[in-house]
Image (cartoon, rainbow, N blue to C red):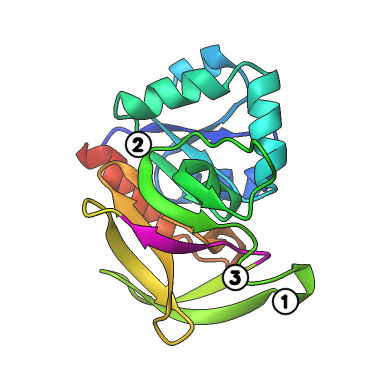
Amino acid sequence: MTIAPTIGVFALQGDVREHARCLEQAGAKAVAVRRPEELEAVDALVVPGGESTTMWKLADAFELLEPLRARIKDGMPAYGSCAGMIMLADRIEGGIEGQQTIGGIDMVVRRNAFGRQVDSFESDIDFAGMGPLRAVFIRAPWVESVGSDVDVLARAEAGDRIVAVRQGPLLATSFHPELTGGCDVHSYFVEMVREL
């Protein structure tokens, strides 16, 4: 029997419960992360959807921003969905003045690229190694460009928009897999964590 990795969910803002449910279903032990000492106790981290400027400000206020950056730099696996994708990007477009990220993935992400809340939609996408996958996009970003070490895992809108990437131990999607009832992306991430 494989030991269940302990995977934290950044719990200061965003859809924490849904990610925790999928992580547990995928065979991990899910815990909330709100403080630096909780971050130190996990094998990996999920940064959920929510609002990226709020996440940045709360991470800074709760003295988590620098510890997050340090753990990512030291190789901790992390998965970010929607706002979490923005938080894992090295560079963003469309952010507020001075907006910061955790960083780690060599990509440029455009905030709210697919439009406002009323422009939210669902679509079937091909996710590398997984086949067709139902994806929910809510005020979602997309990836404008990636560095040479970043693998593009999925595209949307007739292949024009990058919506899932991986760079080493870091995974990011612009959509919300935790809202579709399936936990395939979380299973993929848990396997990543086990392999690293």
Q: Is residue 2 left or right of residue 88?
A: left
Sequence order check, earlier mark of 1 and 3: 1
Give the percent coordinates (x, y) of residue 38. 54, 18
State the quadrant of the C terminus.
top left
Can the viewer see residue 184? Answer: no
- Dot 1: what SS? helix
Q: Is residue 12 visible?
A: yes
Query: Is residue 145 inside the magenta stretch?
Result: yes
Q: Is residue 125 above or below residue 110?
A: below
Front-most of residues 52 and 32:
52
For residue 171, above or below residue 71: below
- How far from the left and from the top, in percent, is residue 18? 62, 51
Q: Amino acid at mark 2?
A: Pro
Is 28 on the left or on the right of 141, as rendered?
A: left
Q: Which residue is mark 1?
A: 119
Residue identifier under label 3: 136
Mark identifier at residue 77 = 2
Mark 1 or 3, closer to the camera: 1
- What is the quadrant of residue 113 in the picture? bottom right
- What x and y, as percent, mark residue 139? 68, 64
Range of residues picked out in magenta: 138-146
Q: Residues within 10 Å of mark 1 (few under 14, many from 20)?
A: few
The number of numbered badges drawn on the structure is 3
User: What's the residue type where badge 1 is placed?
Assistant: Asp
How many angstroms separate mark 1 from mark 2 (CA)? 31 Å
Density class for disc 3 (Cα within 10 Å; few <14, some 14-19, many ≥20) is many
Q: Residue furthest top?
A: 37
At horizontal 20% and vertical 41% (from top left) the residue drawn is: 195
